[in-house]
Image (spheres, rainbow, N blue to C red):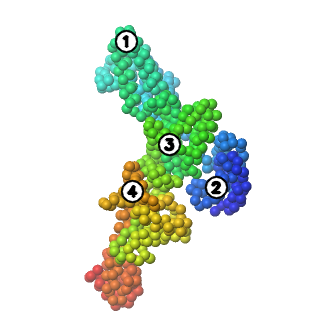
Amino acid sequence: MNERIPYLREKANKLPLSPGVYQMKDSGGKIIYIGKAKALKNRVSSYFRAIESHNAKTYRLVQNINDFDFIVTATELDALVLEASLIKLHSPKYNILLKDDKGYNYIKISGGDYPRITYALQTDDKSAEYIGPYTGGYTVKQAVEEANKLFKLPTCNRKFPRDFGKERPCLNYHIGRCMGVCMGKLTPDEYRKHVDEAINYIKHGSKQSIERLTAEMEEYAEKLEFEKAAEVRDRIAAIQKAELSQHIYSSKKTDYDVIASALNGELLSVAVVKYRGGRLVDKENIFIGETLDKEQAVEDFLVEYYSEKTEMPKELYLAGEIEGKELLESYFTDRFKHRVTIVYPKRGEGLTQVTLAAGNASEYLALRVGRTAKEIAALEDLKNILGLPRTPSVIESYDISNMGETTRVAGMIVYRNGRPYKQGYKKFNIKYVEGIDDYACMQEVIERRFQHYLDGDESFSPLPDLILLDGGKGHVSAVKEVLDRMGIEVSLFGLVKDDKHRTRAIATEGGEIQVNGNKKVFSLITQIQDEVHRFSINFQRQSHGKKQQTLELTRVKGIGEAKAIKLLKEYKTKKALKAATQEQLAKTAGVNEETAKELYLFIQEIL
């Protein structure tokens, strides 16, 4: 524990309730974190209260704070501007620091009389033209492939005019994907006109291309060149068809960016998808890593990301709401000298686009953390459906399994980041509850589990973000009594089954939440419920088998229940018992030679 906490807490409580910037420093005086605040006292003092409840990154930050400094500003906007400049100046360890270590992508237009449009990673060909750079290779490759296809440009390895007439036209010509340049019927000027149209399409999107091609078609028609007019008409139709069938277009012809994030535990990834003139032109994925707070991290990302840009679109579409919306709008409007608006799309095309961006963020994060995008998305959706304070990184689930009154056990399973964490699984024998009472049994198990945690047992750490009980609202109410009494704050829900023992809904104290409309969440909680049931049933069968063996061993004169249990703990299987010598059995059970002999014979002949 940081011994400076009492001093820091006292100092923070003396701060003014004014907007400003604070700078956290380590023991060497180095700035390790810079933040802004609407009210300095409230924000800074929050670091030094309830320290154990902080997430991992905030906890490490607090442990390394030796002192802090602050600067009072006139407005919250001034604090935001100052924070951005100070972060750029000092690059503090615990702030989001975007590193420009990405490779860039370009669209290359080669030189010569018959240029090709291709995808490139370098700009080392002095004779070529380049469009870019782009940060997203996928969108560049897609744009190149689409332009070549729509404008019937060659993509083969032949060189023109050298290879004119040397071979028959390839398959692309015969299926209408290439204009057949290899036949030598197009002059360089005619061919270049097609290339220029493709470049205009890449740069400005379908709307301007259609307008230009329509004017060209009408010009050919006026000149009675109907064959050429028909060719241009077919090209317009192809562009319109492509526009309808792909998600890279937008009905909005203004410029805007779509930003969404994905969280796995405390690791954050952000995707920025860029639309210009009604067309998706670029996509950028940024791995943030550990965060102090997701919502604040997204705000900090927006400030740093756009502070490095020389221009900014008029609209930002965000997948989730942020507290500092108006403040950021003012900051960006002032910086870029035009109105910037933050939008939260709730339906239609905008919602589709933020969903696409969120999918990109999830896929990229999945690659970085070794999880699938579905697992990450399921946890995010589960958080939203249940109204959890954060994405549940650690989930615990419990199930009681009875075989009459003789064998009553419970299983506890753990899921971490959407997958079973079998090192955390626990087994409980019911010790104190008389008779068959599922509610009381569940209360006993939960109390014993969290008492282990309060006693400092590391095998029961950390606290879960979410508890899912195999049972309905009655189980939830019974367990909540125990958690409240012990002072444990963990989100708690039940898993309700239908008549066929299949997951049906999530139970709360007040009712049920239907989840079968969300396939990812429904699949996750079904997996959890099936796994905890499997684990507890297997434990019950093992326990019942051992009890039966215990009863069998007590048939030997001189072997009571305590001695039988000792033997079964030492020799866990019937095979191991049979392999034990008479001397080993005597030592384990603590019996004389005669009793040991009878025991040995009983095991060999009857057990």
Give the quadrant of the N terminus.
bottom right
Three-letter residue code for mark 3:
Ala
Q: CA distance from mark 4 to mark 3?
A: 26 Å
Three-letter residue code for mark 4:
Ala
Tell me if 576 is positioned left or right of 125 in this view: left
What is the secondary structure assignment of the residue under circle 3?
loop
Q: Give the residue number, with chain letter if any, for mark 4.
A: 505
- Dot placed on the residue nearer the N-terminal end, 2 or 1: 2
- Dot placed on the residue nearer the N-terminal end, 2 or 4: 2
Three-letter residue code for mark 2:
Ser
- Dot placed on the residue nearer the N-terminal end, 1 or 3: 1
Q: Are marks 4 and 3 in contact (CB under 8 Å)?
A: no
Q: CA distance from mark 2 to mark 4?
A: 37 Å
Q: Give the residue number, with chain letter if any, for mark 1.
A: 221
- Dot placed on the residue nearer the N-terminal end, 4 or 1: 1
Q: Are marks 3 and 2 in contact (CB under 8 Å)?
A: no
Q: Is residue 410 above or below residue 201?
A: below
Q: CA distance from mark 2 to mark 1?
A: 73 Å
Q: Nearer the viewer, residue 356 or 103?
A: 356
Judge depth for marks 4 and 3 and give the one in front: 4
Q: Give the residue number, with chain letter if any, for mark 2.
A: 46
Q: Give the residue number, with chain letter if any, for mark 3.
A: 319
What is the secondary structure assignment of the residue under circle 2?
helix
Q: CA distance from mark 4 to mark 1?
A: 65 Å
Three-letter residue code for mark 1:
Ala
Q: Is residue 570 above or below residue 324?
A: below
Judge depth for marks 2 and 4 and give the one in front: 4
